[in-house]
Amino acid sequence: MRWSESFLHAASRRLIDCCKACGVSLQEAHSAAGDAMATAQLLAFYLRQARLQPPWGSSLVAARAYPWPSFHGDYHELRMLHRAEVRAARQDQWLDSIIARMPRSASPRVDEYLAVLELALLDGFLAEHEKDALVETARLSGLTRGQVLDLHGLYLQAMAEVAWADGVVTADERAEMLRTALMLGLRETDVDQALAAAAAPGSVLGPEVHSSTAERLANVGIELLPGDRVVFTGDMSVERDVWFARARAAGLEPGGVTKTTKVVVAADPNSLSGKAAKARAYGIPIVTEAAFERLLAACTAG
């Protein structure tokens, strides 16, 4: 899910949509064997696209070094449940759509927080240890309280847009939005505003999250300052020399991809170009020209 938008143009980050996008056959979806086989084939596709040089090496290193805690004591009794029992007990399947369709940020540190948030809210309940994990992730990512609340607001907006996808918001859906909002430190008025924005005249309601939400998310956590290095890649709509001149006028330094690069501007953020692949390996944000335009405006305004 985390790397799907780097390698695919799929309808969402759900396994079935990712498989469709790259021609992988998903047999017996939601069964352990079926999902595992499809995931393995999807991973093989990613590796081929990355020419067997995947950009998630740092994640593997961190996972191997993770100090698993020891457990001493008695385990609680575990009772097996038939899949039908679990499905019958849960009526909020529409929430899964939010997890799959929440747009990705251009900033890895924001994405890291969103990944923890999505996992925590997958069951519709924010446990104490999950709250601790969110706080720790925000701290390690250097996110401010304001940025975290912005992310929560964007998550709520995505919920509103998915809820409106079928043209009606049920009482249960609104109640779930309110419960989520309160867990995330938001208010009932924020729910009303999110629903009103999603239903505003001119909005094209559908299963995809609105581009406005995606565009707002792309800028969260990224701030350009004089002296920052920026990189341009791909066949851009604006001449490269023009971008170079505008970047230099703002005190930025155009150049190649290094570990100190602040942002990579790509004609296609899903590009598998050498510069884009190197940027992903270093955890450098990759943004569109439009997103860079807004970041540049904020930089010059500051």
Image: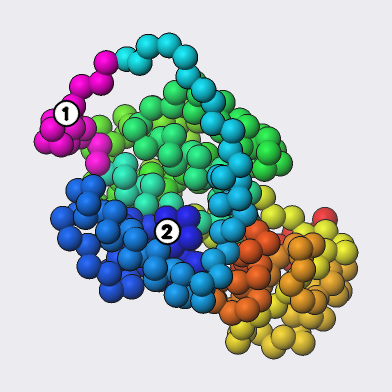
* Quarter occupied by residue 26: bottom left
Q: Position of residue 248 (x, y in %)?
A: 85, 75
Instruction: Check the picture and name the quadrant holding the N terminus.
Output: bottom left
Which of 216 and 3 lies nearest the eye of the viewer? Answer: 3
At a point 32% along the width and 42% down the height, the residue shown is 95
Compared to residue 251, the image places residue 233 above or below, namely below
Instruction: Check the picture and name the quadrant holding the C terminus.
Output: bottom right
Q: Secondary structure under badge 2? A: loop
Q: Which residues are magenta?
A: 77-93
Q: Position of residue 215 (x, y in %)?
A: 54, 60
Q: Residues within 10 Å of mark 2 (few under 14, many from 20)?
A: some
Which of 71 and 193 lies nearest the eye of the viewer? Answer: 71
Which of 270 and 221 lies nearest the eye of the viewer? Answer: 270
* Quarter occupied by residue 118: top left
The amino acid type, in three-letter code, at marker 1 is Leu
Residue 294 seen by the camera? no
The amino acid type, in three-letter code, at marker 2 is His
Q: Position of residue 296 (x, y in %)?
A: 74, 66
Q: Answer whether residue 162 is magenta in the image.
A: no
Q: Answer whether residue 80 is magenta in the image.
A: yes
Q: Is residue 147 left or right of residue 262?
A: left
Q: Residues within 10 Å of mark 1 (few under 14, many from 20)?
A: few
Residue 94 seen by the camera? yes
- Here the colouring is rainbow
